[in-house]
Structures are given as structure tokens and as C-alpha cells.
């Protein structure tokens, strides 16, 4: 494993793929970023957003996974279901749209904002949480658990 800087990363991309694969010492690279770690393995590049939660072979480690939760700040309540979220959003003026059967969608009449969420709450990810926070800055925040 070799940590590399962005300029070294660019140099590697500009090398021919043949010379990169011929090098036996160059197997795995890490480029540390604020949002995660870029992993280069067997010619494949991918971003691991939570580097402590995933091992090098792609399997999950259960010990130190920090998950994110959406919190309604006025009540300090963690959002645990869409029913709870819908109550909080409707109190802020958001209305439910029923156009797409695969999504839960909310719209606020006074804005152009639309919140689109997966129908299954288990697929409710941090990107959806941050979308809600951005559109309701004083009412929600995302926290690590």
C-alpha cells in the first residue's frame, strides 16, 4: 500500500495502462480525501466513503461502522421511519406527491424544491438525509451514531 498525492495520481493516469500493469510493486493505491478514500486495485478505481467500514476485499467489518442518522433539531428526535419524517416535513409546509410509485416525494409550494426518497426506508442513505438538511436548514441535521 502506497499513499499518493493528487499530482502522482495524475501521473499514473497519464501512463499507459500497459506500464501500470507490468509493475508488480504498484498494486493498491490510496488517495485520502475528506469524503473517503480512493482505492486502486487490479486496475479498478472506486471511492470508499467510509474506509473503516470496508476491508480491502470489499467485505464489511461490523466492529467500527459509524452510521449517519437524520435528527429533527427542534425536538432532538432521530427520524426512524418515513411516517415520522412525513409528520415533521408536513409541519414545515411540505406536501406529499403521489406521482411515482417507486419514490416518496415532497414539495413545498413556496419553493422550487423537491425531496425524492426511495420507497423502502432501509435504502434511505446519507445523501437523502443531506438533501433534506439543505432544504430545511433550521429543522434537521445529520449526525454520526
Image (cartoon, rainbow, N blue to C red):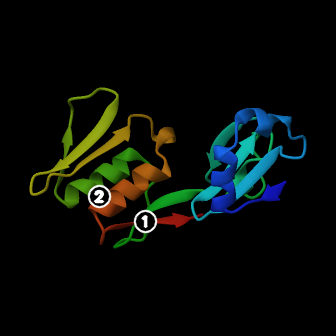
- Would residue 56 appear left or right of 8 to someone viewing this image? right
What is the quadrant of residue 20 in the picture? Answer: top right
Q: Which mark is residue 77?
A: 1
Task: For mark 2, give the secondary structure.
Answer: helix
Residue 111 higher or lower than 119, as above or below? below
Q: Which percent across, then down, holds residue 96? A: 21, 42
Task: Tell which circle, 1 or 2, labels the residue nearer the N-terminal end.
Answer: 1
Q: Which percent across, then down, holds residue 61? A: 78, 48
Q: Which percent across, then down, holds residue 67? A: 60, 56
Q: What residue sits 90% from the left and 40% below the top?
A: 24
Residue 50 in view of the camera: no
Q: Which mark is residue 89?
A: none
- Would residue 41 appear left or right of 91 to someone viewing this image? right
Residue 36 higher or lower than 75, as above or below? above
- Would residue 68 appear left or right of 60 to someone viewing this image? left
Task: For mark 1, give the secondary structure.
Answer: strand
Q: What residue sits 84% from the left and 46% below the top?
A: 26
Q: Nearer the viewer, residue 18 or 124?
A: 18
Q: Residue furthest top?
A: 101
**Crowding at mark 1 (Cα within 10 Å: few <14, some 14-19, many 20+):** few
Q: What residue sits 58% from the left and 65% below the top?
A: 34
Residue 9 in view of the camera: yes
Q: Which mark is residue 88?
A: 2
**Crowding at mark 2 (Cα within 10 Å: few <14, some 14-19, many 20+):** some
Contact? badges 1 and 2 (CB < 8 Å): yes
- Would residue 112 appear left or right of 88 to someone viewing this image? left
Mark 1 and mark 2: Cα distance apart in space: 10 Å
Q: What residue sits 76% from the left and 51% below the top?
A: 29
Q: Which percent across, then down, holds residue 75? A: 37, 71
Amino acid at each position: 500500500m502506497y499513499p499518493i498525492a493528487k499530482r502522482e495520481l495524475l501521473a499514473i493516469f497519464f501512463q499507459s495502462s500497459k506500464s501500470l500493469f507490468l509493475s508488480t510493486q504498484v498494486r493498491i493505491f490510496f488517495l485520502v480525501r475528506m469524503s473517503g478514500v480512493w482505492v486502486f486495485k487490479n486496475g479498478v478505481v472506486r471511492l470508499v466513503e467510509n474506509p473503516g467500514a470496508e476491508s480491502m476485499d470489499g467485505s464489511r467489518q461490523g466492529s467500527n461502522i459509524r452510521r449517519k442518522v437524520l435528527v429533527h433539531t427542534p425536538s432532538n428526535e432521530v427520524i426512524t421511519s418515513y411516517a415520522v419524517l412525513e409528520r415533521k416535513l408536513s409541519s414545515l409546509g411540505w406536501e406529499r406527491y403521489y406521482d411515482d410509485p417507486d419514490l416518496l416525494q415532497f414539495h413545498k409550494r413556496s419553493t422550487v424544491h423537491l425531496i425524492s426518497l426511495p420507497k423502502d426506508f432501509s435504502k434511505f442513505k446519507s445523501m437523502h438525509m443531506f438533501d433534506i438538511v439543505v432544504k430545511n436548514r433550521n429543522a434537521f441535521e445529520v449526525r454520526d451514531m
